[in-house]
């Protein structure tokens, strides 16, 4: 109903700025990592440290999203899906498999 939808929206909006900031940091770090990979003189320690930091940022974003989904379920009884879409080729694959 409308009241539940408003509750879900309010909860998700509460977490959105934090998740967005983490994803933006991860995107920037990923670009820096790509540059570092093709830069002469880069060491494995540099790459490994950046990769660990990138994984940590992604993990934090995933944890926040999971926390938001849990809060939505606790307050409204609505279980939100884990993924929003099927991915880049999801619909094409779905059509090809006849599903």
Image: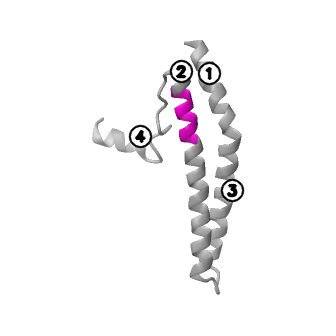
Whether pointer 2 and pointer 1 mark residues with C-beta atoms closer than 8 Å, the reply is yes
Q: Secondary structure at mark 4?
A: helix
1 or 4: mark nearer the eye: 1
Up-down relation of residue 52 to residue 45 (above or below) = above
Q: Secondary structure at mark 3?
A: helix
Q: Which residues are magenta?
A: 65-73
Whether pointer 3 and pointer 4 mark residues with C-beta atoms closer than 8 Å, the reply is no
Up-down relation of residue 53 to residue 6 (above or below) = below
Closer to us: 70 or 30: 70
The residue under label 2 is 76
Q: Residues within 10 Å of mark 2 (few under 14, many from 20)?
A: some
Determine the CA span between mark 2 and mark 1. Answer: 7 Å
The residue under label 4 is 91
Furthest residue toward left: 98
x, y percent for residue 87:
46, 45
x, y percent for residue 18:
69, 44
The residue positioned 64% from the left and 87% from the top of the image is 41
Quarter containing the N terminus: top right
**Secondary structure that dominates the magenta span:** helix
Quarter occupied by residue 71: top right
Which comes before the other along the chain, label 2 or label 1? 1
Which comes before the other along the chain, label 1 or label 4? 1
x, y percent for residue 81:
46, 33
Whether pointer 4 and pointer 2 mark residues with C-beta atoms closer than 8 Å, the reply is no
In the visual, does 23 lie left or right of 95? right
């Amino acid at each position: 109903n409308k009241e539940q939808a408003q509750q879900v929206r309010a909860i998700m909006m509460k977490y959105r700025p934090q998740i967005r900031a983490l994803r933006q940091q991860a995107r920037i770090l990923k670009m820096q990592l790509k540059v570092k990979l093709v830069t002469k003189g880069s060491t494995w320690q540099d790459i490994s440290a950046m990769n660990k930091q990138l994984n940590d940022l992604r993990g934090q974003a995933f944890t926040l999203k999971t926390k938001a989904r849990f809060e939505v379920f606790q307050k409204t009884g609505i279980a939100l899906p884990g993924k929003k879409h099927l991915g880049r080729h999801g619909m094409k694959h779905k059509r090809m498999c006849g599903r």
